[in-house]
Amino acid sequence: MRESDVDTYAYNLLEEVRALAETNDSDPQEAFASVMLEQLAGDGLTEDPAVVRFRDHGVEVSGFGVTSDNRSLDLFITNYSPRADHAHKINRTEIEAAFRRLENFVSRSLSGALARKDPSSEVTGLIRRVVESYPRVDRVRFLLITNARSVTKDPIVPIQLHGRAVTREVWDLRRLANWTTSGSRAEPIIAEFPAGLPCLGTPNTTDDYSVLLTIVPGVDLAELYARHGARLLELNVRSFLQVRGAVNAGIQRTLREYPERFLAYNNGIAATASAVDFDEGGPDQQRRIRRIYDLQIVNGGQTTASIHHARRTTDISSVLVQMKLTVVSPERLDEIVPRISAYSNTQNKVTASDLKANSGFHVDVERIMRTLWAPPGPTHDNDTHWFYERARGQYANALAAESTRSRQKIFKEINPASQKITKSELAKYEASWAMLPQQVCLGAEKNFTLFSEWIDQRQPLVDKDYCQRLVAKAILFRQADRLVARQNFGGYKANIVAYTVAKIAHATGSRVDLDRVWREQAITPALTESLTEISILVQKIITSPPGSSTHVGEWTKKDECWEAVRDIDWVPPPTLNAELTPLDSYTDDVRALRDSQAGDWQDLAAWGASTGTFDDQQRAAVRDVAHALAQGNIPAGKQLRAASRLMGLALDGGFRPSQPPNRSSEAARRA
């Protein structure tokens, strides 16, 4: 990679960290850790990491991640400086010193030397997780993440620590830059098979891809999963399994009772690659696969994970797994691989919503946000854009595409870095406003996956109104984040913020004037005061879980926690109550529309004409809704709101549709 590209990445990273720190009113070190851990999780390099920064004499930690199956523990330490010059370097001595501080954290946690009395502290929760997880996990990793350039050429070797092999990884500026500029995929996986995998090639297909059929020993597959973890699974499959669990009871039973029949009983796996190295020699002249580049499993994630987990208690030496390997040309990987995943998955259905960033919803949000001008606000005197980053790196790429420094300056003035919204942030804002804070607390990846399923089920209408309200929710959430940070609660800020936003939505009946927030690009003093009051009440609830052994972080993921917060006796004060409006009925309008039929709106138009209640324009609006429904479409936002009001008036006036709306159980739960 060219040094000029590394320099560009370094400056863009400083901008991103600075913008996040300003947006969340947080320390730059915390902002850097948040940016890095979220990106690592997005590429499957870790699972549901949390930023927990703690430093004491000879001890330091910046965050942790524990996989959903409790088999892998990741501990992070970050080293950040607001510098982008070539002199900002880190050497072997400094790297080893950082890892020793992590070692000391683990050792003192296990010995009880770091036991803390405050149960509401995030550090206490982290120490408890380490103490409980460390003896059980299969894999422990220490990861040092820094925006300095490493001058160390020799690899960092693993160590033994309290009976566990600990791998140590350094993510320096160059590695981060390479990773980011490679697109949405993480560093490629290269799978080695020293003994070779005999294979058959299919007849020639196209220049885009070729297909190979082979048999993989279960031991090799388990070892690949142990080494690479969830990174081995293509993003669609990985996110799917994170929600539903990675171990299949039926597969486990086959592995225990009939391991030699696994090849016959199991459908096998489907994988993709960008290239394959073959060995054509050997006494049998059989072509064998020696090396696979960019290996990704797109079907059979449960098979792979289950074999890995079974290895601890079961002899899998006789297990064989069939594999269909599709070798895709490198320039078509990002286009073809997700489609193979979506279309070929049969053992666990992966829906179209799992295409995620490429889905129509996100494409529509990106398209509208690029042309949507936000009015001036407290931080900007001119109209600006809120930049929706549908795929990681889009903002940096768009900035780099501007040919001169003056044009880049104009770009940043029009598209401030502080007004960038990522797709995981979008899911977080929407789920919090939809009063699902316990879902938000599951972590960015899991929340985004559940949000994707919601998109698939509801197919929300994305128009200018939706995007303006999305920005308003972002402003509300980010301001709540700042207010909570100023309270110095001592931990669990992200959880408190999600619950505070959900509580304000619940207490006001979702009647906060989001259109006003959009117009002013800020929240009102009354709303600011209310969010502060609620955050104090929320903090007491979520940091006081029932039972002495319950973790605060785990407690916030439960429905019971939301029920406790929802039951807080708080009502909007008169100053806020005076500002509330029914403007947020749009989402309810779409939901009600989906629970109705075209005939209901045709009946409404006829009723309006026969009773003389509606004029020609009103009847036309209702007929347009009926026509859109009959065609399987959703009408425009203004059209829908007008027709919904007419339906409400008609129902009050005695009109009854021939088929009463049926509210789904999910809609009833959220109402």
Image: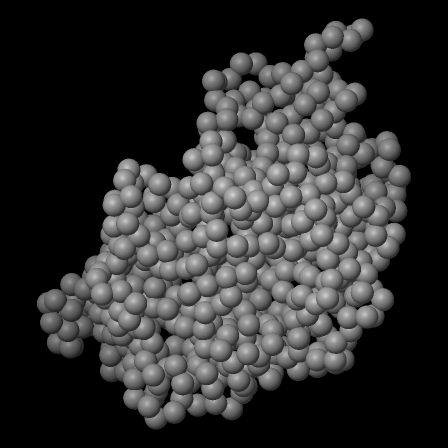
Side of 350 relative to 608 (left or right): right
Pick whichever, 542 or 10, lies toward us.
10
- Which residue is pictured at 27% across the width and 40% down the height? 404
439 versus 6 height, above or below = below
In-front residue for pair 520/56: 56
Number of on-image labels: 0
Q: Which residue is drawn at 35% across and 59% down?
A: 419
**Color encoding of the figure:** one colour
Between 66 and 299, the residue placed more toward the observer is 66
> On the image, which quarter does residue 551 sit in?
bottom right
* Residue furthest bottom as drawn: 574
Quick check: can you spot residue 561? yes
Residue that appears at 78% across and 48% down: 166
In the displayed structure, would residue 466 be above or below residue 250? below
Residue appearing at x 78%, y 60% in the figure: 104
Q: Residue 428 placed where, x, y %?
A: 48, 63
Is any atom of residue 654 visible in this view?
Answer: no
Q: Where is residue 168 in the image (x, y as percent from the top left)?
A: 72, 46
In this view, the residue farthest toward the left is 616
- 282 displayed left or right of 532: right
Q: Where is residue 135 in the image (x, y as percent from the top left)?
A: 84, 58
Q: Residue furthest front?
A: 87
Q: Where is residue 248 in the image (x, y as percent from the top left)?
A: 73, 48
Name the residue nearer the viewer: 254 or 164: 164
